[in-house]
Amino acid sequence: MTAEPNLLRALDYPLLQQCMHCGMCLPSCPTYAATKLERHSPRGRIALMRAIADGELEPAKPFAEEMYYCLGCLACTSACPAGVRYAELFETARAEIERRRLLDSPKRNLIRWSVVRVLFTRPRLLRLAGRLLWLWQAGGGQRLFRKLRLNRLLPRNLRRLEPQAPRACAKFSHQLIAPVEHPRTGRARRRVALLTGCVQDLVFSDINRATADVLLANGCEVHTPPVQPCCGSLHAHNGDLRSARELARRQLDLIDPFAFDAIISNAGGCGSHLRAYGHLLHDDARYAARAAEWSRKLRDIHEFLVGINFRKPAAPGGAPAQSEIENPKSKIENPKSEITLTYHESCHLCHGQKISAAPREVLRALPGARLVECAESSWCCGSAGIYNITQPETSAWLLRRKLGHLRATHAAVVATANPGCHIQLENGLRESGAPGVAVAHPVALLAKAYREEGAI
């Protein structure tokens, strides 16, 4: 295997040459900010990749550990003046690491096989796991387990992770959303497909229902296949490009992009990967054209709503209301405002999809709400897929930094548009003694506003 040309050498070499080593990425990189070590910066990692592509360095365990210390938050891509395609380099490096099995161990191999290769490639099996989790939580098993302090019997890593387990929903997306739904009034002006995700489906099915409601309220005919595969982002980000391509093909077999005006994603991390289907399958003769159309039609829900000039919900007086925006350093008190919101940006929505203004526009449209900007709103919260599991110390440092900025806004609601961020922030706020602060998806807040005015 090692005699074969490695994947980094197979890349178009100009991709590796794009980095000018200017250092503009350094202030934006969370791992560099945490350590101030060059190897933990984007340009340091690219230098390592280029050395391997040039044959000056052989891929080994230290290189593998460095690539997995990277959050993959893509903040460097927003800061880079040269347009370096770091996501492609990052995923290729991790794929090479997995090809060479540089981090293999019996425990790691078992976890990757059971979770990445089995659980997250079989949506019905994943739903079964979600149902068992719900029964455990709703039936009192989890509460009794904690009351008896049986978590002390768990291995240390599981003991640390057990309190972070998300709460599964009583009903999943297919139980809340019909395969095809039409606007309550008037003729549908657009035909869209709604993606329900995997974690989103099990833990935030209410957000998927809210997304469908908002689309219906804006004149869309909504198609939601009841059994949808994982988008493949987990696999691509963890070096399993083969599974990522297979899952992309399954999505394209399930949803014909040529049949819809738009394909809607409401999860920042998933959406970033879903947009890459055109590149992921560009050399697949059977799927290339369909994948290119998919990438062209893929829309984040906020981007889509702003693009169609979504209807602003009415204030109690009957007229649409615009919420205020204030600098977090200014006074919080405002008698006109009923609720204070702040916004945490999902890394892959902001840096991967380059969507930052649209969610704020949705939040500004909420009647009786005031949007207060959070410092470092586009910095990673430390979730980053499974980073909070694989790199708990750096993840916890980032979460503490984020929570400090959120508390400074005095917001009652933190809006965010990615399930990983949502879970991370909820856990962090609860454990830090701020359980009264709610975490919500912007579209769920918009659906609530429509519901209160009787539109849905």
Image (cartoon, rainbow, N blue to C red):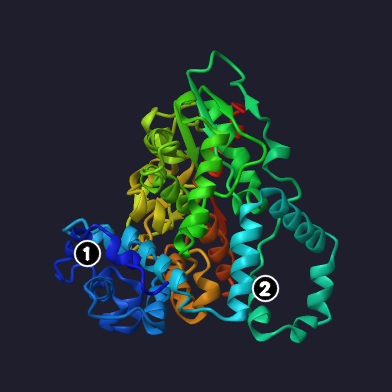
User: At label 2, which amino acid type do we have?
Assistant: Pro
Kindly identify which residue carries mark 2.
163
Front-most of 28 and 366? 28
Instruction: Name the secondary structure under disc 1.
Output: helix
Q: Could you say which quadrant of the image residue 372 lies in?
A: bottom left
Crowding at mark 1 (Cα within 10 Å: few <14, some 14-19, many 20+): many
In this view of the protein, can residue 450 be seen by the observer?
Answer: no
- The mark nearer the N terminus, 2 or 1, is 1
Residue drawn at (31%, 62%) of the image: 89
Which residue lies at the image location 28% right of the left edge and 84% below the top edge? 37
Amino acid at the residue labelled 1: Leu
Vertical placement of 441 versus 234: above or below?
above
Q: Nearer the viewer, residue 210 or 433?
A: 210
Q: Which residue is mark 1?
A: 16
Residue 251 placement: quadrant:
top right
> In percent of the image, x 17 and y 64: which residue is there?
17
Q: Nearer the viewer, residue 305 or 3?
A: 3
